[in-house]
Image (tube, rainbow, N blue to C red):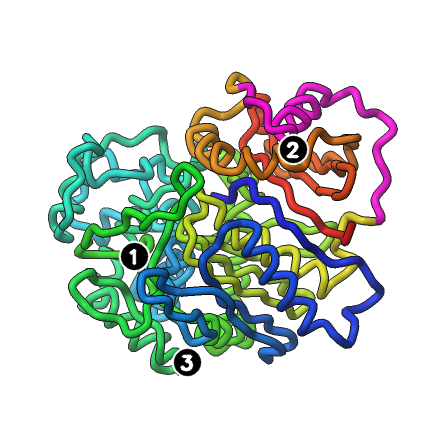
Amino acid sequence: MTTLALMSLAFASAAAPPSDFKSRIDKFLRVSAESMGIPGFAYAVVKDGKVICQGAHGLSNLTYKVRATPKTPFLLASITKQFTAAAIMRLAEQGKVKIDEPISTYLADAPESWHAITVRNLLNHTGGLKDRFEEKNTSLWRLNYSELAMYEAAKSTPVDFAPGTAWQYTDQGYFLLGRIIEEVSGQKYRAFLEESFFKPLGMTSTTTIAMKEIVPNLAEGYAMEGGKIIHNHRRTDYGLVSHFGVISTVGDLAKWVIAMNSGKALKPETVKEMWTPARLADGSEVTGTSGSYGLGWFLEWLNGHRVVQHGGATGTALYTLPDDHLAVIVLTNLEQLSGGNATSLAQSVAKFMVPDASWGSLRPLEDQGQHAEFTTELRHVLSAENANESLYDPTFYRLYRTALASQKAQLAQLGKPLSVDLLFVRPTGSVHTLGYRVKYKDLTLYATVRVGADGKIRYLGAENEELP
């Protein structure tokens, strides 16, 4: 889930990227990462099927002062879901899985509560499953969960709603997809990914995490607590990691996105299906925290340009504009909820590379009053004031308040906004996206607020897009 992130530098719009785009991208990411407190990161930009620039800055390990490089492996977290989805779709291409069949077809001991859930429901997060499932009492979280223990925990976890009636992001669903991959293929999850994708595509630095194993040069993960960098708490060993556990580099992810766009990873018609917005049983398009959702990917629009992307909670992002033949990969080692908003960084680079995707030329709407309560809330939040909890979706707010607390000091330094102007209101299914220009004395931010059918805020984020 993407969270609020502020950046200290951005690009001015132009008719086309200038000749010095490599140095400007590098400087932008370096200065922005420093302002966000990110210890280290790597990045790559892919255009027309080729890597046109890549780099890295900072430290991948603070204890031993190891420099980050483009070859540094990072734990991808939820970017993993697109690999799991691709594995299922490979099995579908082979006729071994039918994604509209109930998951009980492939999981013979599925509980009664799962019998109406299809493989597609798991792929697009409409199965009604909870996100967390491993431990009912999170204060008793263990350092090791076997795959069997995870599966038994999942089977005993109640569902939240009937499949196909709503959208709810769920790690549990992607864990179960991993089980299906293993049951159908007869291989372990890692082995299937290696045989199907990693080895054929030359992704030699990509694997899956196991805490007992040594991965040379793996970036150490960090979080922010009380304004100080600390080690993150990702120390648990899981028997199956199909919901979060792929490790990779920016170079290998560049190979992956090139393969997805060229038909080398999956058939073009399969990729098209994965990148098509899912629909609920009533025919309405699903809406998540970042636009719509396909099969393993978030789908949205950036000022008229199609976006296919996914981020990871460890501070990672793979952000593509497929119709513009562009992909931006940013991998950081700061938890997303602590300010490691790689998606926001990647989006800014994408706007620089495709200038007419930016909001800089948009004028304020004449009617600013219709959404006044959200405009007022945005002004309060960006003035480092307390959020009005009653305006937010409870699930989003639980995560959002952590990110907001970690960035209050940075917001306070900006002072109060001089103006907050609503630029557009765009419906996507049952969600309305509100876009704003927020002007400070020395900085202009562009903010997004997404409001659900219940009138609650499901996302609020801001970034800067033009040089002050």
Tell me if residue 340 is in the magenta stretch.
no
Q: Which secondary structure, mark 1?
A: loop
**Residue drawn at the location 25% of the way across and 39% of the way down:** 115
Near-viewer residue (230 or 78): 230
How far is disc 2 from disc 3 in space, using C-alphas?
39 Å
**Residue type of the residue flagged with mark 1:** Ser
Residue 113 point in image, percent of width and height = 24, 34
Q: Pick whichever, 295 or 8, lies toward us.
A: 8
Q: Amino acid at mark 2?
A: His
Of the numbered discs 1 and 3, the one sitting upstream in the chain is 3
Q: Residue at x 16, y 49 (%)?
A: 108
Identify whether 392 is placed above or below 421: above
Q: Which residues are magenta?
A: 361-388
Can residue 386 be found in the magenta stretch? yes
- For image coordinates 18% across by 43% down, the residue present is 110
Q: Mark 2 sits on what residue?
A: 432
Residue 270 visible in rendering: no
Q: CA distance from mark 1 to mark 3?
A: 19 Å
Q: Would residue 232 be seen by someone viewing this image from the given angle?
A: yes
Which residue position is annotated with label 3?
201
Q: Which residue is mark 1?
A: 242
